[in-house]
Image: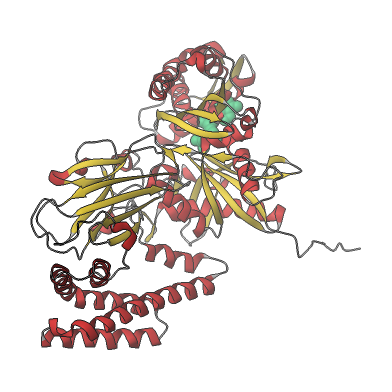
Amino acid sequence: MSLLEIFDPKAAPRPVGIDLGTTNSLVARVRDDKPQVIADCNGARLLPSAVHYDARGAVIVGTPALLLAAEHPRETIVSVKRFMGRGADDAETKRLGTYDFAAPTTPEEAKSVRFKIHDKVVSPVEVSAEILKALRLLAEDELRTVGGVVITVPAYFDDAQRQATKDAGRLAGLDVLRLLNEPTAAALAYGLEKQQNGLFAVYDLGGGTFDVTILLLDNGVFQVKSTGGDSALGGDDMDRALASRFLVEMGAPEGDHGLVRLALDAARQVKHGLTDHDEVEIELPIVGGATKKIVVTRADFDAMIAPIIARTGVACRRALRDAGVKPEELDGVILVGGSTRVPAVRAYVEKLFGKAPLGDINPDEVVALGAAIQADILAGENAHAGEVLLLDVLPLSLGIETMGGVAEKILPRNTTIPAGARQVFTTYADNQTGFDLHIVQGERELAADCRSLARFVLKGIPRMPAGLARLEVTFRVDADGLLSVTAKETTTGVEQHVEVVPSYGLSDEEVETMLLSALDNGEEDFEKRRLIEARVEAEQVLAATKKALAADADLLSDDEKARVSTAITDLEGAVAGDRTAAITTRTEALDDATHAWAGRRMDRAVARAIEGKNLSDVEKDVAEAAGVDAHVEAHASMTRPS
Ligand code: ADP
Ligand code: MG
C-alpha cells in the first residue's frame, strides 16, 4: 500500500529564530511552549557556516562545503560573518584575505568586499543568504511554511553590519521580524526576564570570536549596559595551539598545507574529546609513512590554552568597567558558544566572576533558542506576548561632521536603544543656502577616522547672515539598531529625512535586483510597489513644479524654461509607462532642472516676508518655495520680521 502524505493546507506559517554564526548557524522554533533546535535529516543541529561555489555554478552549504574547503580554499567561503558590512580596504578584510577579491571599479563598490569565484562576483550578503536559505529549507521541511524570523547579531554589530544581515535575510526569502542581539537571546533562553530585575554577564566564546556583554534586567526589560570582546579569539586558537604540537610530533616540514589541515582536524577532535575525558589518544601519521600514537591529557591541554583563556579576562574586566559594575554585583553569568564547553573555560569564568555560570542549556544552541522565543512573541504566538521588551545599546557613537572635520557625537556609544537625540547647529558663513550633512559612526574625534554612513545636502535655506540659521538634527535609532536622520532648518521649516542605508556598498537598487532574481515568490508584488512608489513621488514633483510655474515663471530664463518644460514632458512620458528606473531618473532630472530656480523663489519669498506680510503666510510661502510642507507650529519662537 502506498502512503499518502497528509498535511493541513491551511497550516499557519510558523515563526523561527536563527543564529547566523561565524562558525556554525542554526534554526529553532517554539513547540508546545518550548524552544527547540530543528535538526536536519541526519540529525545534525549545527550547520557549519561554510559555502562552496563549484565550477558548474552549484552552491553547496554546510558540512559538505567544509569538506571541500581544504581542496578549494578560494571557492569556499568560511566565516563570512566577519566580512559583513565591511569595505574592500577594511583592515579586517585584509587580515582575512585568503580569498580572491574583485577589485572595486567605483568608490561605491569599494564600500563592500566582493569575492571573485570562477568569474563570478559575490558579496558577503549573498553568501550569508545561501546559509539562511539552507536554514529556511530545513525549517520548511518541518514546518511547511516559515513565518517571520528573528536573526541574531553580535551586540557590537554596527549599522552597516546589521543592515547587511537584514538584507541577507530578505535575499533568502525570509520575512525578518527583527534582529536580536545574541547575548539578549541567550538571556531569554534562560528565562531570566521572569526574574524581573538583575545584572548579568554573557560570556560567548565561539569558533573565532569572543564577546562579553553586561545586561541589565530592569522590570522585565533587558538593556545592554556594555559590550566588549576580541574578534580574533576562539576555539580555532585552541585548535592551532594543539595542532602546532602535533606538527612537531609528526616531523612535518614547514608550509605543508595538507599536513597542517590534518593536524588541525586532529586537534579539534582531541579538543572535543577532552571536554568529556581526562585524556585522549590519537594516531598521527609521521613523515616517512609510519604512524605514531600520542596521548594528550586534559592538564596538557589546559596549560596550552591558558594564555588564550586569559585574554578573555582582559575583555571581561573592561566590559565590567564600562558598565560600572563590580563582579560581585552580578546576579548571574551565562555561558554561550561551543568553546565554553571546555572545562578549563568554565573554571576560569567561575573564578573571574566569583560565581558558578549558567551553562546547562547547550551553549552552542542557546542563542538560537532565545531567538525562537523572541520570534514566537513577535508573531503573537506566545501567551506572554508583549511582556518581554528588549532593549539593546548602540555599539558605537553616531554623530555628524562639523566645521573642520570634527565628529560631533549625537548619540553616544552604549546609549540604550530605541533612542533619539536632537542637536542644533548653525551656519558658519554668510548666505549659506545649504548644509552638507555627513553622518558618521565611531569613537574617533575626526570624522575622517570614523566610519562614513551617509551624506546628504539640505538645500533651499534662505540667505542669512552666519549664525542665524538654526539646523536641528534629529537622530533616531530603532529597535534593530538602524538609524534614521532628520535635518530641519527651524527658521524656515526646510526639512529633510534620510533612512541611513549604511555604506557597506550595496545600493538599494542592487539589493532589489538581487531580490528580484532570488526570491522564489513575491517578485511581482515587489516590482509593483516600487513602481507605484516611484509614480507617486514623480506626480508630487510634477504637481509642485506646475504650481511653481503658475506663480514664479518670471524667475526663469528662456533657456531654463525650455529645460524645465522638457523635463516635465519627459517625466510625464515615463510616468505613463511602467519602467521604475526611468521614472526615478527623470524625477531626479526635473529636480535638477528646477534647483537654481528654487533658490530664487526662496529669495523672493523672503523678500516678501520682509515686506511685512502675515507671518504664517510667509512661512507657508517660504516652505513651499523650498518644496516642503510648512511646519507652522514649529515656528512659534521665530522672531517676527519688523
Ligand atoms: P560561532 O558562534 O563562532 O558560530 P560556536 O558557538 O558554534 O561558534 O562554537 C564553535 C566552537 O566551539 C568551535 O571552535 C568548536 O570546536 C567548539 N566546540 C564545540 N563543541 C565543543 C566541545 N565539546 N568541546 C570543546 N569545544 C567545542
Ligand atoms: Mg555564536
Q: Is residue 268 left or right of residue 552?
A: right
Seen from the viewer's position, the closer of residues 547 and 52 is 547
Seen from the viewer's position, the closer of residues 344 and 551 is 551
Taking 542 as reference, is 95 above or below it? above
Q: Do we see residue 269 in this rendering?
A: no
Residue at point 63%, 49% (across, down) = 16
Taking 138 as reference, is 279 above or below it? above
Seen from the viewer's position, the closer of residues 366 and 561 is 561
Q: Looking at the rendering, which quadrant does residue 580 occupy?
A: bottom left
Q: Residue 402: x and y, percent? A: 18, 46
Q: Residue 190: x and y, percent? A: 63, 30
Q: Looking at the rendering, which quadrant does residue 119 occupy?
A: bottom left
- Say how many tags the image has: 0
Residue at point 23%, 41% (across, down) = 408
Q: Do we see residue 292 in this rendering?
A: yes
Q: Is residue 11 left or right of residue 570?
A: right
Q: Residue 364: x and y, percent? A: 59, 33
Q: Is residue 6 left or right of residue 34?
A: right
Which quarter of the rendering shows the C terminus?
Answer: bottom left
How are the residues colored?
Answer: secondary structure
Which quarter of the rendering shows the N terminus?
Answer: bottom right
Residue at point 71%, 54% (across, down) = 143
Q: Residue 424: x and y, percent? A: 24, 47
